[in-house]
């Protein structure tokens, strides 16, 4: 079945710096790659997603890139702020009959003021 | 209330108890999901209901029993749980279309379950 690897598991940056989180997936038929942010004690919330027919997508300080050939996608956060501190999960929607989301293990991002 | 709601938010139960978790979505979606979130593990998909029909059961032990009476409500019945079942149980919903479509999953706030 589909497997999603996410790195790093923890990331600490200074306010204003950039943060990059990387994920790889195994199912070449996967076609949808969302990123969720989960603040402490709260529910996961979608922050950005990308479809397999697009290589890059940007929304203000957040961008996601997709390399279908290498089967990896990345989240880029620029000009980080303390409120960006949270756990970030990548996910891949498989190409199988159900196509359910498979999540990575998460990256705990800490932004130090 | 809007979005996806879950009750109770916290639950402590003994191994011999029977309890149920409830999820309700107010988004008009046709698919609902149960996930288990444990420390240092990825979100684990447990069950999927699409148009009220269970379409996925990821080898979940029979002590977890889902029920989906309609497209807006989802229950998870718990019986004879083990301490290792302690986790955050998240419900989610989405609007699914044809095979291969992709739509955002909206999560509920979760139920923090502790099994003594």
Image (tube, helix red, strand yellow):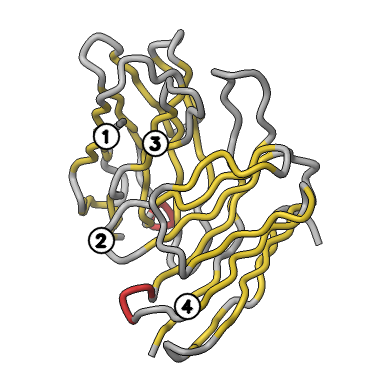
Q: Nearer the viewer, mark 4 or mark 2?
A: 4
**In the image, what residue occupies the spot 48% across and 18% down?**
A51
Whole-percent x, y for residue B15 in the image: 42, 87
Labels 1 and 2 touching (C-beta < 8 A): no
The correct choice, above or below, for B32 with respect to B112 in the image is above
Q: Position of residue A109 (x, y in %)?
A: 29, 53
The residue tagged with tag 3: helix, strand or loop? strand
Quarter of the image with the N terminus of chain A is top left
Residue at screen point 27% across, 34% down: A3
Say which quarter of the image contains residue B27.
top right
Q: Label 3 belongs to which residue?
A: A91
The residue pinned by badge 1 equals: A3
Looking at the image, is mark 1 or mark 2 nearer the viewer? 1
* N-term-proximal mark, 4 vs 2: 2
- Look at the picture and state if B39 lies above or below B55: below
State the residue in front, B70 or A88.
Answer: B70
Q: Residue at label 4?
A: B113
Above or below, A8 relative to A4:
below
Q: Which residue is mark 2?
A: B40
Name the side, left or right, on which B31 lies relative to B100.
Answer: right
Q: Residues within 10 Å of mark 2 (few under 14, many from 20)?
A: few
């Amino acid at each position: 079945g589909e497997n999603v690897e996410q790195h790093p598991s923890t990331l600490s940056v200074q306010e204003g710096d950039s943060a990059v989180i990387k994920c790889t997936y195994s199912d070449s038929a996967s076609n949808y790659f969302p990123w969720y942010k989960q603040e402490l004690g709260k529910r996961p919330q979608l922050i950005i997603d990308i479809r397999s027919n697009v290589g890059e997508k940007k929304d203000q300080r957040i961008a996601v890139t997709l390399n279908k050939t290498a089967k990896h996608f990345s989240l880029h956060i620029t000009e980080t702020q303390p409120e960006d501190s949270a756990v970030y999960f990548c996910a891949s929607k498989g190409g199988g009959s159900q196509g359910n989301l498979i999540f990575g293990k998460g990256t705990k991002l800490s932004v130090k003021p | 209330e809007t979005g996806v709601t879950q009750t109770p938010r916290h639950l402590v139960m003994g191994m011999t108890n029977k309890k149920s978790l409830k999820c309700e979505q107010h988004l008009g979606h046709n698919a609902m999901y149960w996930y288990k979130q444990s420390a240092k593990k990825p979100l684990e998909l447990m069950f999927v209901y699409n148009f009220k029909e269970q379409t996925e059961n990821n080898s979940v032990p029979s002590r977890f029993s889902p029920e989906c009476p309609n497209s807006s409500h989802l229950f998870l019945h718990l019986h004879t749980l083990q301490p290792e079942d302690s986790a955050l149980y998240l419900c989610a919903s989405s609007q699914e279309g044809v095979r291969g479509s992709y739509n955002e999953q909206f999560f509920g706030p979760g139920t923090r379950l502790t099994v003594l």
